Image (cartoon, helix red, strand yellow):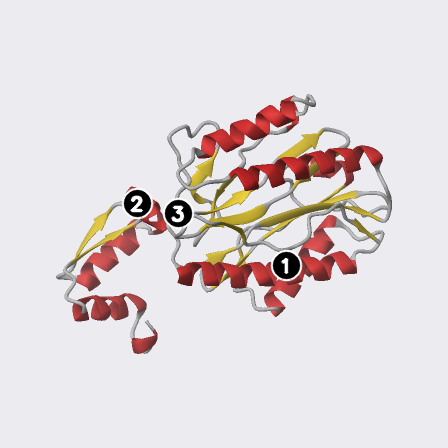
């Protein structure tokens, strides 16, 4: 597209495809309206267009070195933003104000857009896994949960950290340390070719040992790429799903205790072409208290 930027997007794509002697392409129709597909068929003639979203999703599971480089750029911006906002927290700030300030900072630092609306929750609100930031004000001793991701060069990041604001909570501390150990052990156990469902089942079994399974109400993770949720999915419901080389995904166990607090620890994990498992997120996970 950069080679023919004076042309409209579809005309530019057609020119590039014709230059490569390509006479048919496959698209994921989930991304286009009916009118857009009709327009592409008109502009792309004589190139034929076929819809095959399933195959495209499967192809996108394997990330190239270039793609991982873009994801790392998105992660770097995300981590800079989280560092900034944690240092900026003050008693009396609302969840919504923190989310807005974080989004502003992320875009100043080079984010093209957010991967998803930022989740900022305080206190007992953290027990809602994907709650919306509201007018709840930050108080000393509050649990804070921030789930944030950005897009850079079309690729997404996704990370969650949970911590305490200016205080100590023994109950939270014990639950956090237990969940962190589960997440750490799960990441260490990842191998190319293994069942992703088994990882989710293992988390549920570990939580069951302390009667916490009932507070874990989402899957262990999901693939990330040009969309923040894509294949592979790490869920006990996806028994046939496997984790393979070049797969990028999140590992995000959580517990959400109504009326008390929620905890989620989320990292992005990549299995490279040699089968080596790499945690791409670098933000600290040790028990944090922000003052």
Taking 206 as reference, is 136 above or below it? below
Quarter of the image that includes the N terminus: bottom left
> Which one is closest to the eye, mark 2 or mark 3?
3
Callout 2 environment at 10 Å: few (<14), some (14 to 19), or many (20+)?
some
**Which residue is rendered at x = 58% and y = 26% of the image?**
204
Image side of residue 125 versus residue 182, left or right: right
Taking 110 as reference, is 183 above or below it? above
Q: Which residue is mark 1?
A: 79
Give the image quarter of residue 253.
Answer: top right
Q: Which residue is mark 2?
A: 53
**Tag 3 secondary structure:** loop
Give the image quarter of residue 240.
Answer: top left
Q: Which residue is mark 3?
A: 245
Q: Nearer the N terminus, badge 2 or badge 3? A: 2
Image side of residue 144 versus residue 268, left or right: right
Q: Residue 77 placed where, x, y %? A: 59, 63
Image side of residue 61 versus residue 254, left or right: left
Q: Residue 43 placed where, x, y %? A: 21, 63
> Which one is closest to the eye, mark 1 or mark 2?
1
**Which residue is rendered at x = 73% and y = 49% of the image?**
95
**Which residue is rendered at x = 85% and y = 46% of the image?**
139
Q: Residue 184 placed where, x, y %? A: 62, 41
Q: Nearer the N terminus, badge 1 or badge 2? A: 2
**Which residue is rendered at x = 49% and y = 59% of the image?**
71
Taking 89 as reference, is 235 above or below it? above
Q: Are marks 1 and 2 in contact (CB under 8 Å)?
A: no
Callout 1 environment at 10 Å: few (<14), some (14 to 19), or many (20+)?
many
**Tag 2 secondary structure:** helix
Image side of residue 3 versus residue 126, left or right: left
Q: Nearer the viewer, residue 16 or 251?
A: 251
Q: Nearer the N terminus, badge 1 or badge 3? A: 1
């Amino acid at each position: 597209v950069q080679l023919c930027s004076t042309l409209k997007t579809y005309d530019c794509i057609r020119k590039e495809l014709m230059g490569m002697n390509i006479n048919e392409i496959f698209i994921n129709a989930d991304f286009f309206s009916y009118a857009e597909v009709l327009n592409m068929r008109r502009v792309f003639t004589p190139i034929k267009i076929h819809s095959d979203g399933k195959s495209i999703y499967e192809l996108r599971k394997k990330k190239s070195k270039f793609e991982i480089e873009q994801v790392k750029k998105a992660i770097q911006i995300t981590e800079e933003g989280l560092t900034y906002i944690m240092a900026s927290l003050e008693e009396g700030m609302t969840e919504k104000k923190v989310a807005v300030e974080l989004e502003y900072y992320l875009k100043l630092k080079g984010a093209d857009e957010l991967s998803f609306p930022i989740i900022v929750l305080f206190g007992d609100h953290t027990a809602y896994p994907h709650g919306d930031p509201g007018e709840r004000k930050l108080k000393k001793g509050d649990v804070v949960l921030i789930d944030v991701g950005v897009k850079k060069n079309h690729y997404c990041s996704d990370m969650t950290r949970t911590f305490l604001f200016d205080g100590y909570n023994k109950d939270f501390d014990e639950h956090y340390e237990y969940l962190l150990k589960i997440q750490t052990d799960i990441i260490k156990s990842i191998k190319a070719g293994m069942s992703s469902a088994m990882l989710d089942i293992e988390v549920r079994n570990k939580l069951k040992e302390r009667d916490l399974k009932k507070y874990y109400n989402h899957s262990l993770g999901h693939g990330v790429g040009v969309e923040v949720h894509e294949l592979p999915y790490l869920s006990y419901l996806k028994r046939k799903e496997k984790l393979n080389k070049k797969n990028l995904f999140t590992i995000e166990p959580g517990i959400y205790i109504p009326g008390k607090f929620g905890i989620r620890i989320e990292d992005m994990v990549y299995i490279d072409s040699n089968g080596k498992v790499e945690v791409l997120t670098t933000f600290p996970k040790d028990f944090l208290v922000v003052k």
